Amino acid sequence: MQKYAAAALAFTLFQFPFGAQVALAADVTTPVKAIMDATVSNWAGGDSDWQDIFDESKLKDIYSKDFAAKYEAAAQFPAADEDGISPFDYDVIVNAQDACPLEDVKIAAQPPKDNVTEVLATFKKSTCMGSDADYQKVTTVRFEVIEEDGRPVVDDIVTNDDNGNPSSLKSVMQDLVKQQQQQPADQTQQPSDQQKPANPQ
């Protein structure tokens, strides 16, 4: 009887950390799901309002402090878009100005490395544009998630261009600020199309 009890206790102790790891893996996707849910809704069509994935509450709740600071700095130089607030004139998740309703959306956390967990979001964004293979391609967005103040937050968003070259959104925001600060005081803002990657995928 004692051997059975000891074995049961050992099994319970073994299961707990494993369960904790499963819970952590699930939690780490929470901020990514919030961003992707808003993006899916934005491109779904219909009369629903456009959801800003960088509004004040989201910057505070689902992004790291460093990411939020870099966004707020870049937002001082809004793109020539309708709201006059965003530093981007394109959707940074679909990495384009136009997209179809997103299909086959999947979110998967990768094993953590150096206190960073990469969460992959994959989807098809161009299927309504035609049946050619280019329109059926799967887009992958990499979210770098860290723990801050006891909760998972997105510290960077990485997309790829046509050639598969990665682009860090934090780097894009830093470069945007540098470019604007280097301009003469009487020079107008650079054309918005210079901020957008050419033919993004």
Image (cartoon, rainbow, N blue to C red):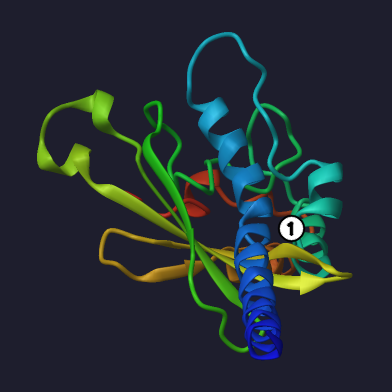
**Residue 26 found in image quarter:** bottom right
The N terminus lies in quadrant: bottom right
Side of 156 relative to 126 (left or right): right
Q: Give the SS element for disc 1.
A: helix
**Residue 55 found in image quarter:** top right
Percent position (x, y) of residue 13?
A: 70, 82
Percent position (x, y) of residue 74?
A: 74, 58
Count of marks, rendered view: 1
Which residue appears farthest toward the left when viewing the image?
A: 132
**Residue 125 found in image quarter:** top left
Side of 149 relative to 31 (left or right): right
Q: Please determine whether, in this image, residue 38 is positioned above or below residue 112.
A: above
Q: Residue at x 70, y 73 (%)?
A: 146
Q: Please determine whether, in this image, residue 112 is positioned above or below residue 192.
A: below
Q: Please determine whether, in this image, residue 156 is positioned above or below residue 196.
A: below
Q: Is residue 89 visible?
A: yes
Percent position (x, y) of residue 172?
A: 58, 65
Q: Residue at x 49, y 26 (%)?
A: 43
* Foreground residue among 122 and 72: 122
* Foreground residue among 141 and 200: 141
Q: Please determine whether, in this image, residue 76 is positioned above or below residue 116.
A: above
Side of 92 relative to 57 (left or right): left
* Foreground residue among 6 and 138: 6
Badge 1: how crowded within 10 Å, few (<14), some, or many (20+)? many
* Foreground residue among 148 and 180: 148
Percent position (x, y) of residue 45?
A: 48, 16
Kind of residue at badge 1: Ala
Q: Is residue 179 visible?
A: no
The residue singled out by tag 1 in the image is: 74
Which residue appears farthest toward the front when viewing the image?
A: 1
